[in-house]
């Protein structure tokens, strides 16, 4: 295989720029535009906030990082991390969270057996997520929607995990249940953080969008490079997304835009 004219792997970054390995003179660096902050999982496994027009390698799941290019999305839940604004159960603040701060909550079964919040702006088509872990041991619990639904029973351990429910039935109306201790649940308490509901037509969840008193939108990542500035004749562009090489692009645009997805590398030959 010939040496690429351009090679980009998730590595160097700064405000408004994401570096390519080749060429190394800056002509192949990508321009980043996103008029809002966003979050990523860093190399320590912690969720951190990136400033406007900054994109950085994402280490979700561990292993080699990816460049997570995301579309615009909105968290429809007005309180993502303040569970005093949810109703039911006993709520205790001050637990270590996935972002390294102490803003997670312990919620537990107490008389009213459910723990829920019912905003009027969520729908049965939403993609819902929440981070959860047990206080100790492993157990089952219904997360994100009413226990009578069929896609929300999860095995939770002492390690933080992000749990996802894509769409659900009308059982329980449109209430977002951070945790429902009824049904097949075996746990009576759980630690939670980062509740999210996105109306994204059945797609997988995007990165965490914090809210505090109203809905919040993260704008799309627009990451581009001016191919006319790169020395040499480019005849193909190969995108490796989710570990799979896509069909090469052979009609070379003057401005190339990285597509949405978990990008492993971009090469131009």
Image (cartoon, rainbow, N blue to C red):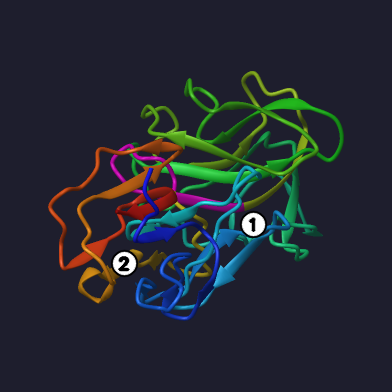
- Where residue 197 sits in the image (x, y, percent)? 44, 49
Q: Secondary structure at mark 1?
A: helix
Query: Which residue was labeled with disc 2?
Result: 222
Nearer mark to the viewer, of 2 and 1: 2
Task: Tell me the CA gap for discs 2 and 1.
Answer: 33 Å
| Residue lying furthest right | 136
Give the vertical position of 112 relative to 252 (above or below): above
Give the vertical position of 139 relative to 67 (above or below): above
Q: Quadrant of the C terminus?
A: bottom left
- Where residue 211 sits in the image (x, y, percent)? 51, 66
Q: Is residue 136 magenta?
A: no
- Where residue 188 sits in the image (x, y, percent)? 77, 32
| Residue lying furthest front | 2
Q: Which residues are magenta?
A: 194-205
| The quarter of the displayed image where residue 8 is located | bottom left
| Residue lying furthest left | 251
Q: Nearer the viewer, residue 159 or 11?
A: 11
Q: Residue at x 35, y 37 (%)?
A: 124
| The quarter of the displayed image where residue 229 is located | bottom left
Whether residue 177 is visible, yes or no, is: yes
Query: Which residue was labeled with disc 1?
Result: 83
Q: Does 164 sit left or right of 53 as displayed?
A: right
């Amino acid at each position: 295989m010939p040496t690429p004219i351009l090679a980009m792997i998730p590595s160097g970054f700064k405000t408004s720029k994401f570096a390519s390995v080749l060429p190394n003179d800056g002509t192949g660096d990508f321009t980043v535009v996103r008029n809002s902050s966003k979050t990523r999982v860093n190399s320590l496994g912690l969720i951190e906030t990136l400033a406007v027009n900054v994109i950085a390698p994402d280490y979700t799941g561990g292993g080699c990082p990816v460049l997570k290019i995301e579309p615009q999305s909105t968290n429809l839940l007005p309180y993502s991390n303040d569970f005093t604004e949810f109703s039911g159960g006993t709520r205790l603040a001050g637990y270590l969270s996935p972002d390294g701060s102490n803003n997670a909550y312990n919620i537990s079964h107490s008389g009213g057996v459910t723990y829920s919040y019912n905003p009027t702006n969520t729908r049965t088509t939403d993609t819902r997520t929440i981070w959860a872990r047990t206080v100790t041991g492993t157990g089952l619990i219904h997360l994100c929607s009413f226990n009578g639904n069929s896609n929300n029973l999860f095995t939770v351990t002492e390690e933080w995990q992000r749990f996802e429910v894509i769409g659900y039935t009308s059982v329980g109306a449109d209430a977002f249940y951070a945790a429902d201790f009824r049904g097949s649940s075996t746990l009576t308490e759980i630690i939670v953080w980062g509740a999210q509901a996105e109306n994204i037509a059945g797609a997988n969840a995007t990165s965490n969008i914090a809210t505090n008193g109203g809905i919040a939108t993260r704008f799309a990542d627009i990451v581009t490079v001016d191919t006319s500035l790169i020395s040499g004749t480019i005849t193909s562009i190969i995108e490796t997304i989710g570990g799979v090489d896509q069909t090469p692009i052979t009609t070379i645009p003057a401005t190339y835009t990285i597509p949405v997805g978990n990008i492993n590398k971009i090469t131009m030959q």
